Image (cartoon, helix red, strand yellow):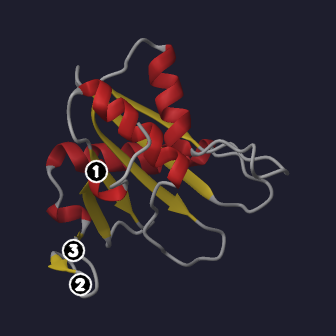
Amino acid sequence: MANGMHPSNNYAVTDYAHLEPKYRKLLAEARKVTVNSYDPYRHYKVGAALLTDSGEIISAANVANSSYINSTCAERSAIAKANSQGERKFTAIAVIGRPSSGKSHIITPCGTCRQIIYEFASYSGRDMDVIMSNWSMKRIIVLKISKLLPLPHR
């Protein structure tokens, strides 16, 4: 269903070849960094990559632990890494994951990550694009953070 509207939702599903070049590069960086994922429990490798206002790409992987609740998603890892480098204004974030089950789901940010992305989008003065992909990059959704988190905590 590449480049078509999903029948039950108001979003388009595309593929890697049809993404803007800057988003292809961002998604490729997110995919590449999954090798640094630490999740010995669920074996779910996730990578995220941020595009800063200055054009830099900052990527990071998820870090899990046995309590799960204290794990850090790739999106939050990338934002924390960028923030610690003094980068706080972003234009987009890409996220991709490879579950151990072999299923190829489109990866979407969790609620906590959506809130954090929203806050940095607000700080950046824009409604950031969130690029979400399955592992094969044949099913990709690009949505504004306001669509993913329509009622943010303010």
- Residue 69 placement (x, y as % from top left): 74, 49
Give the secondary structure at mark 3: loop
Closer to viewer: mark 2 or mark 3:
3
Give the secondary structure at mark 1: helix
Q: Is residue 56 at least partly visible in the picture?
A: no
Indicate whether 83 appears above or below 99: above
Give the secondary structure at mark 2: loop
- Residue 138 placement (x, y as % from top left): 32, 72
| Residue sitting at x 85%, y 51% | 66
Disc assigned to residue 146: 1
Q: Which residue is identified by label 3?
A: 10
| Residue sitting at x 36%, y 59% | 132
Q: Are marks 2 and 3 in contact (CB under 8 Å)?
A: no
Q: Earlier in the sequence, mark 1 or mark 3?
A: 3
Position of the N terminus, as image quadrant, is: bottom left
| Residue type marked 2 | Met
Q: Are marks 1 and 3 in contact (CB under 8 Å)?
A: no
Q: Give the CA distance from mark 2 to mark 3.
A: 14 Å
Q: Which residue is identified by label 2?
A: 1
Q: Give the CA distance from mark 1 to mark 2.
A: 24 Å
Q: Is residue 66 left or right of residue 86?
A: right
Q: Is residue 61 left or right of residue 131?
A: right
Mark 3: few, some, or many residues within 10 Å (few <14, many ≥20)?
A: few
Mark 2: few, some, or many residues within 10 Å (few <14, many ≥20)?
A: few
User: Furthest-top residue in view?
Assistant: 86
| Residue type marked 1 | Ser
User: Furthest-bottom residue in view?
Assistant: 7
